[in-house]
Amino acid sequence: MRASKQQASTRRKNLWVALALCAITLLAYSNSFSAGFTFDNHGLILEDARIREASDANLRLIVEHTYWWPYGESGLYRPLTTLSYLFNYVILGNGDQPAGYHAVNFLLHFGNVLLVLLLARKLLGSEWPPVFIAALWAVHPVLTESVTNIVGRADLLAGGATLGGFLMYLKSAEKEGRRRWAWLGGLMLATCAGVFSKESAVTVLGAERCFGSGDTANDDLLGTPTRDSPRLRPTAPPLRLAQKPRSERRWRLEYARRAGDW
Protein backbone atom coordinates (compact mmCIF):
# COMPACT_ATOMS: atom_id res chain seq x y z
CA MET A 1 0.00 0.00 0.00
CA ARG A 2 2.79 2.40 0.93
CA ALA A 3 4.69 1.47 -2.22
CA SER A 4 1.67 2.22 -4.43
CA LYS A 5 1.20 5.62 -2.76
CA GLN A 6 4.86 6.39 -3.29
CA GLN A 7 4.60 5.44 -6.95
CA ALA A 8 1.54 7.64 -7.39
CA SER A 9 3.37 10.52 -5.71
CA THR A 10 6.36 10.02 -8.00
CA ARG A 11 4.13 10.01 -11.09
CA ARG A 12 2.46 13.24 -10.00
CA LYS A 13 5.83 14.84 -9.35
CA ASN A 14 7.10 13.76 -12.76
CA LEU A 15 3.95 15.13 -14.39
CA TRP A 16 4.42 18.52 -12.73
CA VAL A 17 8.06 18.57 -13.78
CA ALA A 18 7.08 17.80 -17.38
CA LEU A 19 4.39 20.51 -17.35
CA ALA A 20 6.84 23.04 -15.92
CA LEU A 21 9.42 22.22 -18.60
CA CYS A 22 6.72 22.47 -21.27
CA ALA A 23 5.68 25.89 -19.97
CA ILE A 24 9.30 27.12 -19.96
CA THR A 25 9.86 25.82 -23.48
CA LEU A 26 6.62 27.31 -24.77
CA LEU A 27 7.43 30.64 -23.18
CA ALA A 28 10.81 30.70 -24.91
CA TYR A 29 9.47 29.76 -28.36
CA SER A 30 5.92 31.13 -28.36
CA ASN A 31 6.86 33.78 -30.93
CA SER A 32 8.21 31.20 -33.38
CA PHE A 33 4.75 30.07 -34.49
CA SER A 34 4.20 33.30 -36.42
CA ALA A 35 7.52 33.08 -38.29
CA GLY A 36 7.25 32.49 -42.01
CA PHE A 37 9.21 30.48 -44.57
CA THR A 38 12.71 31.92 -44.94
CA PHE A 39 15.88 31.08 -46.85
CA ASP A 40 16.21 27.29 -47.32
CA ASN A 41 12.55 26.74 -46.38
CA HIS A 42 11.50 27.88 -49.84
CA GLY A 43 13.59 25.36 -51.74
CA LEU A 44 13.17 22.43 -49.35
CA ILE A 45 9.45 22.83 -48.62
CA LEU A 46 7.53 25.27 -50.81
CA GLU A 47 9.32 24.36 -54.04
CA ASP A 48 9.78 20.61 -53.49
CA ALA A 49 7.18 18.82 -55.60
CA ARG A 50 7.91 15.53 -53.83
CA ILE A 51 6.01 16.58 -50.70
CA ARG A 52 2.87 17.82 -52.48
CA GLU A 53 1.22 14.39 -52.55
CA ALA A 54 1.60 11.15 -50.60
CA SER A 55 2.07 8.87 -53.61
CA ASP A 56 4.32 5.92 -54.40
CA ALA A 57 6.10 7.98 -57.03
CA ASN A 58 6.92 10.77 -54.58
CA LEU A 59 8.06 8.31 -51.93
CA ARG A 60 10.44 6.74 -54.45
CA LEU A 61 11.78 10.16 -55.38
CA ILE A 62 12.41 10.96 -51.72
CA VAL A 63 14.23 7.68 -51.13
CA GLU A 64 16.18 7.62 -54.39
CA HIS A 65 17.38 11.22 -54.41
CA THR A 66 19.21 13.50 -52.03
CA TYR A 67 17.97 16.32 -49.83
CA TRP A 68 18.18 19.20 -52.32
CA TRP A 69 16.74 17.38 -55.32
CA PRO A 70 15.57 18.47 -57.95
CA TYR A 71 18.04 21.38 -57.75
CA GLY A 72 20.89 18.88 -57.80
CA GLU A 73 22.30 15.89 -55.97
CA SER A 74 23.80 17.61 -52.94
CA GLY A 75 25.32 14.58 -51.22
CA LEU A 76 23.05 15.16 -48.20
CA TYR A 77 20.76 12.16 -47.81
CA ARG A 78 17.96 12.98 -45.33
CA PRO A 79 14.83 11.10 -46.45
CA LEU A 80 13.18 11.05 -43.01
CA THR A 81 13.43 14.83 -42.74
CA THR A 82 11.86 15.23 -46.17
CA LEU A 83 9.14 12.75 -45.20
CA SER A 84 8.38 14.87 -42.15
CA TYR A 85 7.76 17.85 -44.46
CA LEU A 86 5.41 15.68 -46.50
CA PHE A 87 3.64 14.76 -43.25
CA ASN A 88 3.05 18.44 -42.57
CA TYR A 89 2.15 19.40 -46.12
CA VAL A 90 -0.23 16.55 -46.93
CA ILE A 91 -1.24 14.54 -43.86
CA LEU A 92 -1.73 17.52 -41.52
CA GLY A 93 -2.84 19.71 -44.41
CA ASN A 94 -0.56 22.60 -43.52
CA GLY A 95 0.43 23.27 -47.13
CA ASP A 96 2.09 26.66 -47.36
CA GLN A 97 0.99 27.77 -43.88
CA PRO A 98 4.02 27.78 -41.56
CA ALA A 99 2.29 27.51 -38.16
CA GLY A 100 1.82 23.74 -38.37
CA TYR A 101 5.46 23.18 -39.28
CA HIS A 102 6.55 25.27 -36.29
CA ALA A 103 4.21 23.29 -34.02
CA VAL A 104 5.87 20.03 -35.07
CA ASN A 105 9.31 21.56 -34.48
CA PHE A 106 8.23 22.67 -31.03
CA LEU A 107 6.94 19.19 -30.14
CA LEU A 108 10.17 17.60 -31.34
CA HIS A 109 12.20 20.04 -29.28
CA PHE A 110 10.09 19.40 -26.18
CA GLY A 111 10.49 15.66 -26.71
CA ASN A 112 14.26 16.19 -26.74
CA VAL A 113 13.97 18.18 -23.50
CA LEU A 114 12.30 15.19 -21.85
CA LEU A 115 15.00 12.88 -23.22
CA VAL A 116 17.66 15.14 -21.71
CA LEU A 117 15.82 14.92 -18.39
CA LEU A 118 15.73 11.12 -18.49
CA LEU A 119 19.34 10.88 -19.62
CA ALA A 120 20.57 13.26 -16.92
CA ARG A 121 18.70 11.33 -14.24
CA LYS A 122 20.25 8.14 -15.54
CA LEU A 123 23.76 9.55 -15.45
CA LEU A 124 23.59 11.61 -12.26
CA GLY A 125 21.30 9.40 -10.21
CA SER A 126 19.71 12.45 -8.58
CA GLU A 127 16.32 14.13 -8.85
CA TRP A 128 16.53 17.92 -9.17
CA PRO A 129 19.85 18.71 -10.93
CA PRO A 130 18.59 16.89 -14.06
CA VAL A 131 15.52 19.14 -14.05
CA PHE A 132 17.72 22.23 -14.24
CA ILE A 133 19.83 20.61 -16.97
CA ALA A 134 16.69 19.90 -19.01
CA ALA A 135 15.42 23.45 -18.42
CA LEU A 136 18.74 24.81 -19.68
CA TRP A 137 18.46 22.62 -22.77
CA ALA A 138 14.92 23.91 -23.31
CA VAL A 139 15.89 27.59 -23.50
CA HIS A 140 19.54 27.57 -24.51
CA PRO A 141 20.06 30.03 -27.40
CA VAL A 142 22.30 27.60 -29.31
CA LEU A 143 19.14 25.66 -30.23
CA THR A 144 17.17 28.68 -31.41
CA GLU A 145 17.77 28.14 -35.12
CA SER A 146 16.98 24.44 -34.93
CA VAL A 147 13.56 25.19 -33.42
CA THR A 148 12.49 28.43 -35.10
CA ASN A 149 13.85 27.66 -38.56
CA ILE A 150 11.55 25.01 -40.02
CA VAL A 151 14.30 23.14 -41.86
CA GLY A 152 16.20 23.06 -38.57
CA ARG A 153 14.01 20.02 -38.01
CA ALA A 154 16.87 17.91 -39.32
CA ASP A 155 18.83 18.87 -36.20
CA LEU A 156 15.87 18.13 -33.92
CA LEU A 157 15.32 14.68 -35.43
CA ALA A 158 19.01 13.82 -35.33
CA GLY A 159 19.30 15.15 -31.78
CA GLY A 160 16.33 13.12 -30.60
CA ALA A 161 17.76 9.97 -32.18
CA THR A 162 21.14 10.61 -30.54
CA LEU A 163 19.69 11.26 -27.09
CA GLY A 164 17.26 8.36 -27.33
CA GLY A 165 19.90 6.03 -28.69
CA PHE A 166 22.33 6.88 -25.90
CA LEU A 167 19.60 6.33 -23.32
CA MET A 168 18.86 2.90 -24.82
CA TYR A 169 22.56 2.14 -24.71
CA LEU A 170 22.58 2.84 -20.96
CA LYS A 171 19.42 0.77 -20.51
CA SER A 172 21.08 -2.17 -22.24
CA ALA A 173 23.81 -2.13 -19.58
CA GLU A 174 21.21 -3.04 -16.95
CA LYS A 175 19.74 -5.98 -18.84
CA GLU A 176 20.84 -9.45 -19.82
CA GLY A 177 19.96 -11.86 -22.58
CA ARG A 178 17.11 -10.99 -24.91
CA ARG A 179 16.16 -7.79 -23.12
CA ARG A 180 19.66 -6.45 -23.54
CA TRP A 181 19.63 -7.25 -27.25
CA ALA A 182 16.18 -5.67 -27.54
CA TRP A 183 17.57 -2.37 -26.20
CA LEU A 184 20.55 -2.66 -28.54
CA GLY A 185 18.14 -3.30 -31.41
CA GLY A 186 16.31 -0.11 -30.47
CA LEU A 187 19.64 1.67 -30.43
CA MET A 188 20.36 0.45 -33.95
CA LEU A 189 16.96 1.67 -35.19
CA ALA A 190 17.39 5.04 -33.48
CA THR A 191 20.84 5.45 -35.04
CA CYS A 192 19.52 4.65 -38.50
CA ALA A 193 16.61 7.07 -38.06
CA GLY A 194 18.99 9.76 -36.88
CA VAL A 195 21.47 9.31 -39.72
CA PHE A 196 18.64 9.41 -42.28
CA SER A 197 17.48 12.67 -40.70
CA LYS A 198 20.90 14.30 -40.53
CA GLU A 199 24.28 12.66 -40.94
CA SER A 200 25.68 14.14 -37.70
CA ALA A 201 23.60 11.64 -35.71
CA VAL A 202 26.30 9.05 -36.38
CA THR A 203 28.18 10.60 -33.44
CA VAL A 204 26.00 8.56 -31.09
CA LEU A 205 28.24 5.58 -31.85
CA GLY A 206 31.33 7.52 -30.82
CA ALA A 207 29.61 8.70 -27.63
CA GLU A 208 28.76 5.13 -26.72
CA ARG A 209 32.28 3.93 -27.36
CA CYS A 210 33.78 6.77 -25.30
CA PHE A 211 31.39 6.01 -22.47
CA GLY A 212 32.15 2.26 -22.46
CA SER A 213 33.86 0.68 -19.49
CA GLY A 214 37.03 -0.13 -21.41
CA ASP A 215 36.81 -3.73 -20.19
CA THR A 216 37.21 -5.62 -23.44
CA ALA A 217 36.47 -8.93 -21.75
CA ASN A 218 32.91 -7.82 -21.06
CA ASP A 219 32.25 -5.24 -23.77
CA ASP A 220 30.96 -6.02 -27.24
CA LEU A 221 32.18 -4.33 -30.42
CA LEU A 222 30.39 -1.08 -29.54
CA GLY A 223 31.90 -1.00 -26.09
CA THR A 224 28.57 -1.89 -24.50
CA PRO A 225 29.00 -2.79 -20.83
CA THR A 226 27.41 -5.81 -19.22
CA ARG A 227 26.38 -6.41 -15.63
CA ASP A 228 29.93 -7.50 -14.85
CA SER A 229 31.42 -4.22 -16.07
CA PRO A 230 32.28 -1.35 -13.73
CA ARG A 231 29.51 1.06 -12.80
CA LEU A 232 28.92 3.51 -15.64
CA ARG A 233 30.56 6.83 -14.81
CA PRO A 234 32.22 9.20 -17.28
CA THR A 235 35.11 9.75 -14.83
CA ALA A 236 35.33 6.20 -13.49
CA PRO A 237 38.95 5.00 -13.25
CA PRO A 238 39.34 1.94 -15.49
CA LEU A 239 39.77 -1.50 -14.03
CA ARG A 240 42.44 -4.00 -15.05
CA LEU A 241 45.14 -1.35 -15.36
CA ALA A 242 47.71 -4.10 -15.39
CA GLN A 243 46.55 -5.00 -18.90
CA LYS A 244 47.28 -1.47 -20.19
CA PRO A 245 50.68 -0.32 -21.52
CA ARG A 246 52.90 1.17 -18.81
CA SER A 247 52.69 4.73 -20.18
CA GLU A 248 48.90 4.53 -20.33
CA ARG A 249 48.70 3.11 -16.81
CA ARG A 250 50.84 5.97 -15.52
CA TRP A 251 48.67 8.56 -17.31
CA ARG A 252 45.42 7.05 -16.02
CA LEU A 253 46.72 6.80 -12.46
CA GLU A 254 47.88 10.41 -12.54
CA TYR A 255 44.54 11.52 -13.99
CA ALA A 256 42.62 9.65 -11.32
CA ARG A 257 44.83 11.09 -8.57
CA ARG A 258 44.33 14.65 -9.75
CA ALA A 259 40.58 14.12 -10.20
CA GLY A 260 40.32 12.93 -6.61
CA ASP A 261 38.74 9.63 -7.56
CA TRP A 262 41.33 7.62 -5.61
Image (cartoon, rainbow, N blue to C red):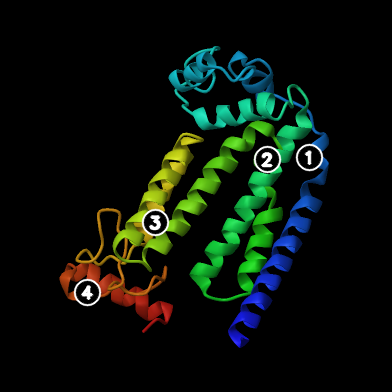
Residue type at tag 3: Trp
Residue identified by numbered label 4: 241
Q: Nearer the viewer, mark 1 or mark 4?
A: 1
Residue 248 place in picture, x, y as percent: 24, 67
Q: Along the polypeptide, which appears first: circle 2 or circle 4?
A: 2
Q: Is residue 252 above or below residue 137?
A: below
Residue 164 place in picture, x, y as percent: 50, 53
Residue type at tag 2: Asn
Label 1 with label 2: CB-CB less than 8 Å: yes
Q: Nearer the viewer, mark 3 or mark 2?
A: 3
- Front residue of this view, candidates 46 and 183: 183
Residue identified by numbered label 2: 105
- Front residue of this view, candidates 194 and 3: 3
Residue 7 place in picture, x, y as percent: 62, 77
Disc 3 secondary structure class: helix
- C-alpha distance separating marks 1 and 2: 10 Å
- The residue lying furthest to the bottom in this view is 2
- C-alpha distance separating marks 3 and 1: 36 Å
